[in-house]
Image (cartoon, helix red, strand yellow):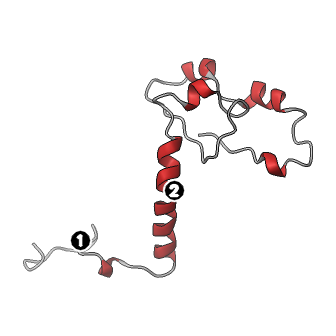
Amino acid sequence: MMLRVQRERMNAAFFPTEREYSRRYGLDGERMAKMPEHAIVMHPGPMVRGMEITAEVADSDRCTVVEQVANGVSVRMAVLYLLLGGNDSDSAAPSPSTPRTEESK
């Protein structure tokens, strides 16, 4: 899983240049080839292509960033709902911890 570099907040010199960051920490095809075949590439988005991740990796079948971004709003809404007092009584399906009775089968 990669972390996002917030280029817009990089007023201080946390690393000397974008080129150095890319060389040291960026994910490219060579580094991805060293990962296990079943490993996926995750990133919270938006990606800084060419610095954090190469186009080759970002566009590969193993990259899940598009799905992460697409599902991110729904997941955050669900978490906020639960944190703000939502519960399973609004749902028709019983929770795994709820014992099933003859009426609910």
- The answer to the question of whether label 1 and label 2 lie on touching residues, with beta carbons closer than 8 A, is no
The percent coordinates of residue 78 (x first, y second) are: 45, 68
Quadrant position of residue 21: top right
Query: Which quadrant holds the N terminus?
Result: top right
Relative to 71, 4 lies left or right: right
Q: Earlier in the sequence, mark 1 or mark 2?
A: 2
Disc ID at residue 82: none
Q: Amino acid at mark 1?
A: Ala
Nearer to the camera, 105 or 63: 63
In this picture, residue 19 sits left or right of residue 50: right
Image quadrant containing the C terminus: bottom left
Residue 89's image quarter?
A: bottom left
Residue of label 1:
93
- Estimate the spatial distance between the alpha carbons at disc 1 and disc 2, rounded to whole Å: 24 Å
Q: What number of labels is visible?
A: 2
Compared to 13, does 93 lie above or below?
below
Foreground tag (1 vs 2): 2
Label 1, residues with CA under 10 Å away: few <14, some 14-19, many ≥20: few
Describe the element under mark 2 as helix, strand or loop: helix
Q: Position of residue 8 (x, y in %)?
A: 81, 50
Quarter assignment of residue 26:
top right
The kind of residue tagged 2 is Gly
Q: Which element carries disc 1, helix, strand or loop?
A: loop
Residue 16: image x %, image y %?
A: 90, 34
Q: Residue at x 49, y 39 (%)?
A: 64
Q: Residue at x 67, y 44 (%)?
A: 3
Q: Residue at x 54, y 35 (%)?
A: 41
Q: Give neighbour class at mark 2: few <14, some 14-19, many 20+ (Cα, 10 Å).
A: few
Front residue (pair 47, 85): 47
Question: Observer-nearest residue: 68 or 100?
Answer: 68
**As rendered, which of 75 and 97 lies closer to the eye?**
75
Disc 2 designates what residue? 72
